Image (cartoon, rainbow, N blue to C red):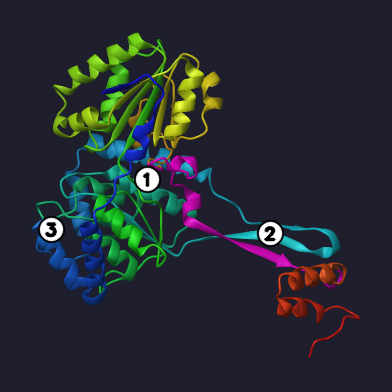
Amino acid sequence: MEWIEDGDLDFLKKRKVEAKEAAQQSVQLIIEKVKAEGDQAIRAFTKKFDGIELTDLRVSEKEVEEAAARVPQEVRRAISQAAANIRAFHEKQMPESWTETVEDGVLLGQKVTPLDSVGIYVPGGTACYPSSVLMGAIPALVAGVGRVVLISPPQKNGLIADGVLAAAREIGITEIYQAGGAQAIAALAYGTETIRPVDKIVGPGNLYVMLAKKQVFGDVAIDSLAGPSEIAVLADDSAHPSWVAADLLSQAEHDKMSMPVLITPSRSLAEEVDKEVERQLETLPRRDIAEPSIETVGKIVLVKDLKEAAEAVNKIAPEHLELAVADTESVLPLIRHAGAIFLGMYSSEPVGDYFAGPNHIIPTNGSARYASPLGVDSFVKRSSLIRYTDEALQKNGSAIAAFARYEGLEGHARAVEKRLKGAAVHD
């Protein structure tokens, strides 16, 4: 890992992965093909990119049941427990409609309405992410979205991963399709003969998925344009070096471009963590992925004290932040920008990835400066409510008309003045 001791965080300028023009053009062509040819294009791209010939795009109830039965009972129990935790957490987020009556009988308020339909993209192909099913779909279900659709690429055996289907079954998702990459995003956005379009698309994916979400945004809503995973561990001398190293590697194994960062005022801890990372890498099954992340992106930021450490965190605005310090309560108020904050030595980042309840779809690339994790509010919209009375309009109409006329909008002014007693009527 690269050491930084001068406070220079210039590496942050380079963490955003820019797509080459060829990749952007390729995604655009895929989207146009799906819009024009529908199911036929989905099948053609699945054969081209995944080497699989699809018959039915939709996964049958029987296939879901059979897949769930193949998942080890211990894992099914873990999925069930995690789903309960995630639901309980997100139920506390539900916004409410409200109204109030103010002076002169004026009614103001907001009406909260769930989206009609949402598509949950779950990565797959060579991996299995049932946690992505739970994190993407449960907030939508809690919000009351009427139609929640799951789409995921098939594995080499021609089927979506068993764990993904088991998680979908656990939470009651029945509309499931086999497709991946940019073609899956296009199908959700514009529809095919088999797949009806949705209003919003959420979920992580590779570069081509991200580019496709970027291109369809505006025709549909999206959650975010996610980049490689990030973790910052702010640690003092009370931290256990091997635990910190393991947590850094837990994100490094996601992607060669994942960003693991240790921030500490303790040189001795930094040296021990650096050694531990190298030692643990030797036996890590995904070493071929984690090692490039550690060597080319990983950083150890040495600071003078915890206040300076918090300032570094706020500049990084990491996706995941662990406060591996003796007194988390004194450091937490100093943190302004982080997607998910893990407090204390036993709050390892994977606890949040899978089980605790908060969402693991979190802003990356520094967007935690202005964005929040996926939640129930991601799946509802607010409508303003306004009911003016005659008394209120007579009192305030002249001011409203003056405001409108000042902006050069005579039609606005006249629309109000026609209702005012004694005002000039513009016929």
The residue beneath circle 2 is 109
Residue 217's x, y, as percent? 39, 62
Badge 2 element: strand
Q: Which tag, 1 or 2, sits closer to the chain's start?
A: 2
The residue beneath circle 3 is 49
User: Which amino acid, by three-letter code, is at mark 1?
Assistant: Met
Is residue 334 in sight in this rendering?
Answer: yes
Residue that sits furthest to the bottom in the current view: 427
Left or right: 141, with 57 as reference point: right
Is residue 269 shown above or below 176?
above
Image point (40%, 49%), residue name = 138
| Viewer-proximal residue among 422 and 112 | 422
Picture quadrant where residue 406 is located: bottom right
Picture quadrant where residue 250 is located: top left
Circles 3 and 1: CB atoms closer than 8 Å: no
Left or right: 99, with 161 as reference point: right
* CA gap, disc 1 and disc 2: 30 Å
Residue 173's x, y, as percent? 33, 56
How many other residues sit within 10 Å of disc 2, few (<14), some (14-19) or many (≥20)? some
Residues drawn in magenta: 363-391
Badge 1 element: helix
Badge 3 element: helix
User: Which amino acid, by three-letter code, is at mark 3?
Assistant: Phe
| Viewer-proximal residue among 170 and 104 | 104
Is residue 55 in sight in this rendering?
Answer: no
The residue beneath circle 1 is 135
| Viewer-proximal residue among 353 and 225 | 225
Q: Which tag, 3 or 2, sits closer to the chain's start?
A: 3
Q: Quadrant of the C terminus?
A: bottom right
Image point (47%, 55%), residue name = 379
Which callout, 3 or 1, points to the residue nearer the camera? 3
User: Which amino acid, by three-letter code, is at mark 2?
Assistant: Gly
